[in-house]
Image (cartoon, grey):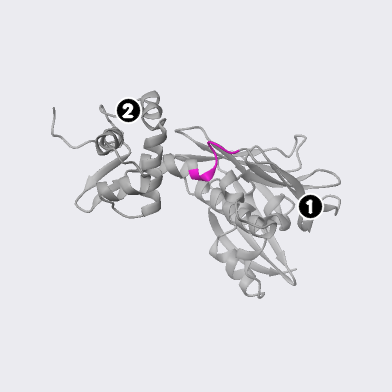
Amino acid sequence: MSDAPPSDTESLLACEECLAPSEAFAVVGNETRLSILEALWTLDRPAAFSDIRREVGMSDSAQFNYHLSKLRGQFIHKTEGGYEFRAAGRSVIAAVLSGTLNQDPTLEPFTVAGSCLSCDGPLEAVYEDERIEIRCRDCERSHGGYAFPPGGIEDRTREELMAAFNQRARHLSCLSADGVCPDCSGRMETHLTDVRDADDPERVRVEHECQRCHHTIRSSVGLVLLDDARIVSFYQDHDIDLNSVPFWTLDWCVSDRHTTVERSGDPWRLTLSIPLEDEQLVLDLDGDLSVLAAERRPV
């Protein structure tokens, strides 16, 4: 085997000893092994053999050791301080605790803050297929929707649930725009589509697609920029904490009313104008939705 370092164009992952997906699921598809992973999660520290066995409640040491050995390597590993998670093990138990693998809850639609941008009707949150969508009760216009694991609903009031959803939507959109897939951490690419002539309420469709798992997130131009320091400061100067404002109540964030396509195609140039009281923040953007210039103007 050559000792030459990999080139910049070579993949960083070349694992000949990795488990096939079917083998990986077979390893963790056992109640005792899942109990071991859950015990390690609960202990929340490098744990000794005896500590994990006690947490699991298994008296047969040999049998416990057999199941523990099946998890070693791919899902957990042993260090000087004890047994610890590897990334795969933590992901498995996190998926179980999130409720994605074993829960399918339903919620009756309930009213949320804000009014419809199209008809001024009341907005409601709808939870279906592990996804929260904000829509108008009268005209059913969507004001944004994102995946939300069932475990996030537990022990939360409706108000707390929507506060968590507001933060999760921001996180998903901003992480995707930064090129990192929220699902697998693969490379996310952003694509813009000019839809002004299509039967669509938007001017620009923003889609983030993972090149590894093909997970796709659709966003608006405004939502991508929701955490931009210039916008946050603009709101702060008007005594508003933008982080606490539900994104679905911001028209520049969930619609393209304030987005102007200066030039579509390659290269893209767009303008996003954010009105607030007696002034507006005007942002010039490129095809990656990076801010090229920002200016405050009177309304």
- Residue 216 vertical position relative to residue 20 in the rendered view, above or below: below
Q: Is residue 98 magenta?
A: yes
How far apart in space, not on screen, are marks 1 and 2 (Cα)?
Answer: 47 Å
Q: Tell me if I can see residue 224 in this picture.
A: no
* Residue 160 location, quadrant: bottom right
Q: What amino acid is labelled 2 in the image?
A: Leu
Q: Residue 46: percent from the left, percent from the top?
A: 28, 53
Please give the residue where the numbered disc 1 appears in the rendered image: 123
Q: Quadrant of the N terminus?
A: top left
Q: What amino acid is labelled 1 in the image?
A: Leu
Q: Residue 219: percent from the left, percent from the top?
A: 62, 45
Q: Nearer the viewer, mark 1 or mark 2?
A: 2
Q: Tell me if I can see residue 153 in this picture.
A: yes
* Residue 111 location, quadrant: bottom right
Local crowd at mark 1 within 10 Å, few (<14), some, or many (≥20)?
Answer: many
Q: Nearer the viewer, residue 125 or 270?
A: 125
- Residue 168 vertical position relative to residue 245 in the rendered view, above or below: above
Please give the residue where the numbered disc 2 appears in the rendered image: 19
The residue at 63%/65% (across/down) is 244
For the magenta stretch, what is the residue range? 97-103
The answer to which of marks 1 and 2 sits earlier in the sequence is 2
The residue at 37%/44% (across/down) is 56
* Residue 89 location, quadrant: top left
Q: Is residue 204 magenta?
A: no
The residue at 67%/74% (across/down) is 238
